[in-house]
Amino acid sequence: MSRHPAARQRQQRHVHAVLRHIDRHLDQPLDLVALAAVAHVSPFHFHRVFRAWTGENLGDYLSRRRLTLAACWLCNEPAASVLTLALRAGFASGEAFSRAFKARFGLSPSQWRGASAAKRQELRNLDQAAQVALRHDGPVFSDLEPDMHVTLCQRPAVTVAYLRHTGPYGQAIAEFWRDQFVPWLHAQALLPYAKYGIGHDNPQLTDPAQCRYDACVALPPGYAPPADMLTMTIPGGLYAVYDFRGGVPEIAQAWTALFAEWLPASGWGVDARPCFEFYPEDAFFDPATGEFSCQICLAVRPLNS
């Protein structure tokens, strides 16, 4: 990576753009030349730059992300065949998918689909805040709210500036907001505007050191971001929305319940757009207790599409 701050920030923007491109096209063939163009580097230098920023080579990253998505699909789409999900995840055959899946998760795809949440967590043995939501086999959200009221709504695309945290979720995210994101918002005069939190990786299936989280703020009309500011567009479209109020442990449980309980019974699946937490300008926050409110937004599509 470049030692010059301006060049390093530019390269960081380009690598983040590559990761967004990959995450939104994991069900498609990904061409090295096209990825290098997104990164604004030559194909010859792409692998070196990619590994320098992610700590993984491209092939390992693609395999990990595709298998993680497939593991979620196996639980969230019970009617879909293993072969259908294998092909959607970019594998050429069910056999190749099953071998790679078992090598990563210790169970075949069919065994994974039939295992309890606690058993899947035990196999992964990850130290994440979301483990609290997987400590038993029963309904993970029963202590919070018996009936999750989820609504479907169209959300517009929004341009945001963001800071990235790479590492464990849970309390570390709260500290990231307090120690880095909020002071940065003050410095940029952006504190009054709506905010978003995007967890790009499933913390139940991804090693803590590899989890990516973006703390984002909506940019007001006419705002000209400085050259060193990271920006992106959160896609619009149809989202399933749950109004949340609670603390850090409870929001981990809420995310788990949405994916483990509401989604499989809903007739909807998640698509390649990011899911996020939306904090409107008047969002509630109690600094004394740590309680806060937000909307948890899942990017959804009909299961037959």
Image (spheres, helix red, strand yellow):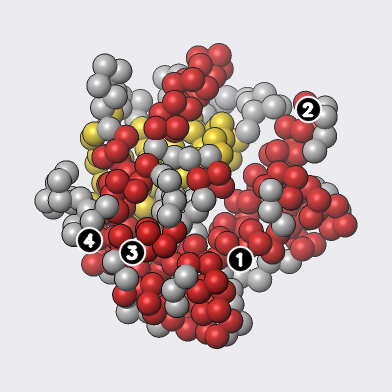
Pinpoint residue 63: horizontal percent, then vertical percent. 61, 65
| Helix, strand or loop under label 4 | loop
Quadrant of image for the N terminus: top right
Q: Which residue was labeled with disc 3? A: 119
Q: Earlier in the sequence, mark 1 or mark 4?
A: 1
Q: Earlier in the sequence, mark 3 or mark 1?
A: 1
Pinpoint residue 178: horizontal percent, then vertical percent. 44, 21
Q: Which residue was labeled with disc 2? A: 6
In the image, what residue occupies the spot 54% across and 35% down? 165
Residue type, numbered disc 1? Ser
Q: Are marks 4 and 2 in contact (CB under 8 Å)?
A: no
Q: Earlier in the sequence, mark 1 or mark 2?
A: 2
Residue type, numbered disc 3? Lys
Q: Are marks 1 and 4 in contact (CB under 8 Å)?
A: no
Residue type, numbered disc 4? Asp
Q: Disc 2 to disc 3, how far (Cα)?
A: 47 Å
Q: Are marks 4 and 3 in contact (CB under 8 Å)?
A: no
Q: Earlier in the sequence, mark 4 or mark 3?
A: 3
Q: Earlier in the sequence, mark 4 or mark 2?
A: 2
Q: Earlier in the sequence, mark 2 or mark 3?
A: 2
Q: Which residue was labeled with disc 4? A: 137
In this view of the protein, which residue sits in the foreground, 4 or 175?
Answer: 175
Residue type, numbered disc 2? Ala
Q: Nearer the viewer, mark 2 or mark 3?
A: 3
Pinpoint residue 278: horizontal percent, then vertical percent. 37, 37
